[in-house]
Image (cartoon, rainbow, N blue to C red):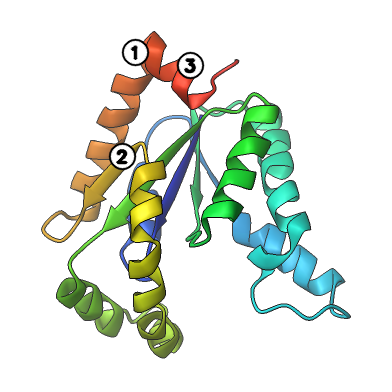
Amino acid sequence: MIVWINGTFGVGKTTTANALLGRDGWRSFDPEHVGFLLAGNLRDREFRDFQDLPPWRVLVPAVADEIYRFTSPSAMIAVQTVLVADYWEELVAGFRYRGLPIFHVLLECDESELRRRITADEVESQALEWRLDHIAESRAARSWMADAADLVLDTTDVGPEAAADRIADALTAVLASDASLGRLGCQR
């Protein structure tokens, strides 16, 4: 099972994922590393974001599948903001083609709390302006993201450990339901 944590930049995806990684058998998969590989090898191409490169959307499910098969984790956590619905659909199709079920989590919080988190972040303080500049773009994508999510989790008043518990509980409930497994495209 791939647990993909999506949401606006600065909402707490990585912090929540780190809380999930303390669980037995859970592994991290960073789709951004696939983007770094492509960016380093496609310097002759112009692109604004590596997600705009069709190979990124093909390679992310392929690389995730190889790591999943090699390590056999209980769950693999991918943390990446995807704001373009067509890109998300391509990723999901790639995961399904490989028989990898995906559980899509959308983290969100109210805008004042989001701005507070972004400005208080000392780990990625260099991304402050970039994150603030992308709030409107994330807000515009929210509708399709929520529709595509298996779990929408408002973290305005929820800490990372509690958010991780809610994600794990929701995933456990989904895995216990045969009907949900079919909806998620589970074939393993």
Q: Position of residue 48 (x, y in %)?
A: 66, 79
> Which quadrant of the view contains residue 165?
top left
Q: Position of residue 72 (x, y in %)?
A: 61, 26
Which element is circle 2 on? strand
Which element is circle 3 on? helix
Task: Indicate whether 39 appears above or below 180.
Answer: below
| Real-space CA distance between mark 3 and mark 1, rounded to the nearest whole angstrom | 12 Å
Q: Position of residue 100 (x, y in %)?
A: 60, 28
Image side of residue 182 versus residue 174, left or right? right
| Real-space CA distance between mark 2 and mark 3, rounded to the nearest whole angstrom | 16 Å
Q: Which residue is mark 1?
A: 176
Which amino acid, by three-letter code, is at mark 3? Gly
Which amino acid, by three-letter code, is at mark 2? Leu
Task: Indicate whether 143 appears above or below 71.
Answer: below
> Which quadrant of the view contains residue 8?
bottom left
Q: Residue at x 78, y 56 (%)?
A: 55
Q: Which residue is mark 3?
A: 182
Disc 2 packing (10 Å; few <14; some 14–19; many ≥20): some
Which element is circle 1 on? loop
| Real-space CA distance between mark 2 and mark 1, rounded to the nearest whole angstrom | 16 Å
Q: Which residue is mark 2?
A: 151
Image side of residue 69 versus residue 85, left or right? right
Which amino acid, by three-letter code, is at mark 1? Ala
Point out the residue furthest to the left here.
157
Disc 1 packing (10 Å; few <14; some 14–19; many ≥20): few
| Mark sitting earlier along the chain (2/3) | 2
Residue 30 seen in this snapshot: no
| Mark sitting earlier along the chain (2/1) | 2
Q: Residue at x 85, y 72 (%)?
A: 42
